[in-house]
């Protein structure tokens, strides 16, 4: 009976998130500098009706919504995996420097330092290098314990500094071209990057689901997980690889958008509450969060557009401070 | 004050040789900062200008540009190093650094807000920066009260890093919304003393003097507190009051430094780390050693910032991050984490 309720609760949470995502997406298509009423939206989506509306929807808003949803889902899934593997809810890719390193690598290719690899590939490489470095510097402890996180923090700081150096050395228009990379924005997404991200997300999501049971056992201590038949090293390595893939590709689309990886899994855990690692729910929550935040960024100070990374950071503030000052801080540790 | 219980470190002469060496390094760094720069004036011309000879232009560059800048670097380095040492002793966390924990971030955010609202005088900016730093400090102390963060140095740092990131994002929003304010602080916000006018230094000095008095007052009690709060109580100190005084001192120091140089990360981490490596864990020794080492580090970093990318300048914050992050990694790798 309990099992049934739990299962239904998870399903209900996921369905609810799908509905929320649909609503957020539709709202995000409707509102903007040019408002597109709902019936015109349907026409435009079907390829009919007003030419302006068609252009706005097909060329501007739809690709943006898709990019936002994919990037949000990827960030959130990566965050959920990282949190589970490191057993620490603060250990998200953004905090441990993966975002920053991916950005530094991507900026290196955008500002033309002679490296002519496409930005998504560079971002992925950066994410991988940062994780590998953090892993190597952490020594025998692997992803467990504080060393991995602090090593990541240091690497993130160095990567951030290098990004600044590059931006301060190049001509102003190159720096402007690279600016979206540094704050996190859906303005500069490239179609190839979005398509790559879509493939990456599918791969990451399926792998995560296959690892699902093992990840659930990771919530216990190592000996318990081993006794339950989990091959710890393999699960950790695979989860980490997934997180790197997802973060790298998402940074290539949206830049380093903070807080999605922290907040979305938290929301998903609250909704599901079933002792399971809520992988799919996290991804959905991330997509909802990102699409909504991007819409808010476009509307709040219109016509000025706030980058989505700023919105997510500001929304994350009260929540984060709440975690910090709450006397009985529940942690995954 | 209870000197028989916690021996005065300067009574033993062990501290004299390292202090002498460190002072020598400061003097060397001051000269380096005066003699090398981005412009065409080389060391030889600079020397002539210093003793009042040489071309008009060289004298101007040295006396009006490099000398004030060097003075500002010295004061900033001093303030950040002492603040870092105090914060680390108070939280017993070798990674507790004003820049990492969000104290500098709070300060920078407050200044940006003030500039946006039209503040322009140096005195006002300094006060605002210090109030912002106090808010940041209070948040840190609140965080250390929470059960998970008090005992775990890394979680505190992680939390601080997140708060810092957040404050910087909020600062960017303000800058996006107000172009004029953004232009005013664009370079400062990355951490730089390139454009800081000398009048700012004069505005900051009084509050730093107050902080200095506070530091002298709390040094011995802090050393006692490193034995544990009960021991400090037993020695006749009042932990609550000491904590408050330290907090105010850190806020004054970091706020002052941020008003001068923008939010600099890692300076407050590296210097006390070196000082402890030389002088051991006693906070009084650490503070003494921070006095020469802090300015040395900032002077070296600032000189590097000028000459690496000459004729353009690198932000000072970039150099301190590049110098500081490896130290952070080393502290973590050395496995000496919980030794405070």
Image (cartoon, coloured by chain):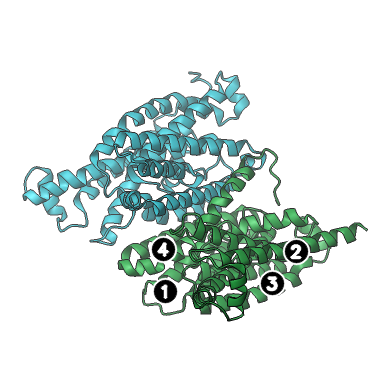
Chain colours: A green, B cyan
Q: Quadrant of residue B333?
A: bottom right
Of the residues under marks 3 and 2, which one precedes in the sequence? 2
Q: Which mark is residue A257?
A: none
Q: Position of residue B82 (x, y in %)?
A: 41, 37
Residue A89 in the image: above or below residue B74: below
Query: Is A37 situated left or right of A114 in this image?
Result: right
The mark lying in front, picked from 4 and 2, is 2
Which of the two residues, A14 or B27, is positioned nearer the viewer here? A14
Marks 3 and 4 sit apart, C-alpha to C-alpha, by 30 Å
Q: Which subunit holds the residue at mark 4?
A: A
Protein chain holding label 1: A
Look at the image and tell me whether residue A181 can be seen: yes
Q: Residue tagged by mark 4?
A: A163
- Circles 3 and 1 in contact, beta carbons < 8 Å: no
Q: Is residue A8 left or right of residue B132?
A: right
Are the two marked residues, 4 and 2, in contact with CB atoms closer than 8 angstroms?
Answer: no
Q: CA distance from mark 2 to mark 1?
A: 38 Å
Above or below: residue A288 compared with residue A48: above
Query: What residue is shown at x 44% (from left), y 59% (from top)?
Result: A303
- In the rendered image, the vertical position of residue A160 relative to residue B144, given as above or below: below
Q: Is residue A44 left or right of residue A100?
A: right
The residue indicated by pointer 1 is A109
How much space separates mark 4 and mark 2, taking CA atoms?
Answer: 38 Å
- Label 2: how many Cα within 10 Å (few below 14, some 14–19, many 20+): many
* Residue at the disc numbered 2: A14
């Amino acid at each position: 009976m309990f099992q049934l309720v739990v299962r239904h609760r998870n399903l209900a949470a996921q369905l609810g998130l799908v509905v929320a995502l649909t609503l957020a997406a539709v709202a995000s298509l409707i509102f903007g500098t040019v408002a597109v009423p709902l019936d015109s939206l349907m026409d435009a989506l079907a390829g009919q009706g007003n030419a302006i509306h068609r252009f706005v929807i097909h060329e501007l808003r739809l690709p943006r919504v898709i990019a936002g949803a994919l990037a949000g889902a990827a960030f959130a899934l990566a965050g959920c995996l990282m949190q589970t593997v490191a057993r620490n809810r603060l250990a998200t890719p953004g905090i441990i420097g993966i975002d920053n390193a991916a950005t530094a690598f991507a900026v290196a290719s955008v500002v033309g330092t002679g490296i002519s690899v496409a930005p998504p590939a560079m971002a992925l490489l950066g994410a991988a290098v940062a994780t590998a470095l953090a892993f190597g510097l952490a020594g025998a402890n692997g992803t467990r314990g504080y060393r991995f996180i602090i090593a990541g923090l240091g690497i993130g700081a160095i990567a951030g500094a290098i990004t600044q150096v590059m931006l301060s050395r190049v001509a102003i228009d190159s720096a402007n071209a690279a600016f979206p990379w540094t704050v996190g924005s859906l303005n500069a997404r490239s179609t190839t990057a979005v398509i790559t991200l879509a493939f990456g997300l599918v791969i990451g999501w399926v792998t995560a689901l296959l690892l699902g049971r093992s990840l659930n056992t990771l919530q216990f201590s190592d000996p318990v997980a081993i006794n339950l038949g989990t091959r710890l090293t393999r699960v950790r390595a695979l989860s980490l690889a997934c997180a790197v893939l997802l973060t790298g590709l998402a940074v290539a689309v949206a830049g380093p958008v903070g807080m999605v990886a922290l907040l979305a899994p938290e929301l998903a855990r609250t909704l599901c509450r079933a002792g399971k690692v809520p992988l799919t729910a996290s991804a959905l929550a991330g997509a909802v969060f990102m699409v909504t935040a991007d819409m808010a960024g476009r509307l709040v100070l219109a016509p000025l557009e706030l980058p989505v990374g700023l919105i997510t950071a500001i929304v994350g503030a009260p929540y984060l401070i709440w975690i910090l000052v709450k006397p009985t801080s529940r942690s995954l540790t | 004050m209870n000197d028989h219980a916690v021996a005065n470190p300067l009574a033993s002469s062990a501290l004299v040789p390292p202090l002498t060496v460190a002072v020598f390094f400061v003097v060397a760094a001051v000269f380096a900062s005066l003699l090398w720069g981005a412009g065409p004036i080389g060391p030889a011309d600079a020397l002539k200008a210093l003793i009042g000879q040489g071309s008009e232009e060289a004298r101007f560059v040295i006396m009006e540009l490099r000398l004030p800048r060097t003075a500002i670097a010295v004061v900033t380095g001093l303030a950040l190093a002492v603040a870092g040492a105090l914060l680390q002793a108070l939280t017993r966390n070798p990674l507790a650094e004003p820049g990492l924990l969000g104290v500098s971030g709070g300060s920078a955010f407050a200044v940006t807000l003030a500039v946006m609202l039209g503040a322009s005088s140096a005195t006002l900016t300094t006060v605002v920066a210090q109030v912002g730093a106090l808010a940041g400090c209070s948040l840190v102390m609140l965080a250390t009260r929470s059960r998970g963060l008090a005992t775990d140095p890394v979680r505190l740092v992680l939390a601080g890093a997140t708060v810092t990131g957040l404050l910087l994002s909020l600062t960017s929003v303000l800058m996006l919304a107000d172009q004029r304010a953004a232009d005013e602080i664009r370079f400062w916000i990355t951490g730089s003393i390139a454009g800081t006018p000398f009048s700012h230094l004069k505005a900051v000095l009084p509050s730093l003097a107050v902080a200095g008095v506070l530091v002298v007052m709390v040094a011995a009690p802090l050393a006692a507190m490193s034995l544990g709060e009960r021991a400090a109580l037993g020695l006749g100190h009042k932990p609550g009051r000491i904590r408050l005084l330290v907090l105010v001192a850190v806020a004054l120091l970091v706020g002052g430094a941020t008003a001068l140089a923008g939010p600099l990360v890692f300076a407050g981490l590296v210097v006390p780390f070196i000082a402890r490596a030389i002088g051991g864990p006693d906070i009084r020794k650490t503070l003494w050693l921070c006095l020469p080492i802090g300015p040395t580090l900032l002077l070296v970093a600032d000189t590097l910032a000028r000459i690496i990318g000459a004729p353009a300048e690198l932000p000072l914050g970039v150099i301190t991050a590049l110098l500081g992050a490896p130290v952070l990694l080393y502290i973590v790798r050395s496995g000496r984490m919980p030794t405070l």
